[in-house]
Image (tube, rainbow, N blue to C red):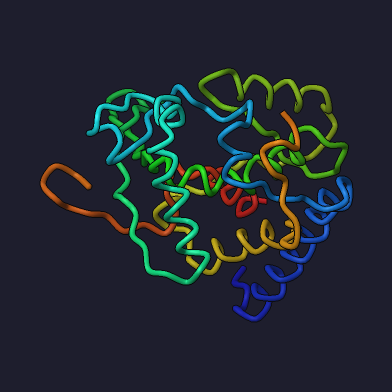
Amino acid sequence: KVISSSKIAIMYQTRLEKIQSISTLCRHATNQIVAGTLGFVEKHPEFLKDRSPGLPWKLKGYKTKGECLENPNARKVWHTKWDRIRRGKDETFPDSALFLRAQISKVGTDKICAVWGIPIDVIIEEGKTFHPYIRCLRDDDNNIPIAYRAEMAIGGMAYVNDMLEAHPDSNYIIGDWSKFDRTAPAWLIRDCFQIIYDSIDHCHVIDSEAFLACPNGQKFASLQKNGQVFHQHTHSFAHW
C-alpha cells in the first residue's frame, strides 16, 4: 500500500510530539537537567580518562585523556578556545582521527565501522550536557524506553532476548536502520538534537564543586559521526 507524503508527514509529526512529551518526563523528574562547566566534566568520575585524547594531542606524546587533564597548560588550550567562542570569536579545532572497528557479519563478508576519535577539546565541551543527560536517562525513575548500554559485544542481544521471552504473548517489532550514519537525513538529526536541547536548563550550570585529518590530508564530511558522545542518543531517538 502506497502512503501519500502528506500522511507520512502527519505520522512523523505525531510520533515526534510523542517522543518530545516522553523526553520531557526525564526533565521534570529531576527538576530540569542542569548542564555542567568544563571543570565539572574534567573532574567527573565517569569521564573516560584512559582513552586517546585525539589529534593533535596524540602526536604531541599524550597517550590518554588523563595525561592531558594532568597538564594545566593542555587544559588552558581548550578553556581558552571555548571562552573565545562564547564571546563570539572565531576559533578552529583539530581534525578527528579515524579508527576502523571490525563488526559481526555474515560468513565471507568483511564489515568494518568507522569510529571517529573526537579531540578531547570537543569531548570536554559536549560532556557539559552529556553527563547530566545520560544520568537522567540511565539512573532516574522515568518512562523513557531506552535500554542504555545494551551493546551486542557485551551481551546486549541476550538482554533483549530475555526481555522478549519474559512477555511471550506480546507483539513486537525488532529492526535497525541500515547504514544509519550515512543515510539519516539532516532534518532528522536536527530534530533529535532539538529533543535533547529542550530538556536542558540553559540558565544555570553545575560547577566542578557541585559533586564529586588522515595522513594524506584527506578529510571526510558526515551528517552524524560514530564517536560523538550524543551519537547513541540521536540513533535511539531516530529509531524510536
- Tally of numbered discs: 0
Q: Position of residue 233 (x, y in %)?
A: 61, 46
In this rendered view, identify the residue nearer to me: 26 or 127.
Answer: 127
Q: Position of residue 236 (x, y in %)?
A: 62, 46
Q: Quadrant of the N terminus?
A: bottom right
- Indicate whether 160 appears above or below 39: above
The residue that appears at 59% across and 72% down in the rendered structure is 2
Lateral position of residue 76 relative to residue 149, left or right: left
Q: Position of residue 86 (x, y in %)?
A: 52, 65
Classify residue 15 by image quadrant: bottom right
The residue that appears at 69% across and 50% down in the rendered structure is 35
In this rendered view, identify the residue nearer to me: 32 or 17.
Answer: 32
Lateral position of residue 67 relative to residue 35, left or right: left
Classify residue 63 by image quadrant: top left
Furthest-left residue in view? 216
The residue that appears at 72% across and 52% down in the rendered structure is 205
Furthest-front residue in view? 72
In this rendered view, identify the residue nearer to me: 128 or 230.
Answer: 128
- Indicate whether 200 appears above or below 63: below
Q: Position of residue 171 (x, y in %)?
A: 79, 40
- Indicate whether 109 appears above or below 145: above
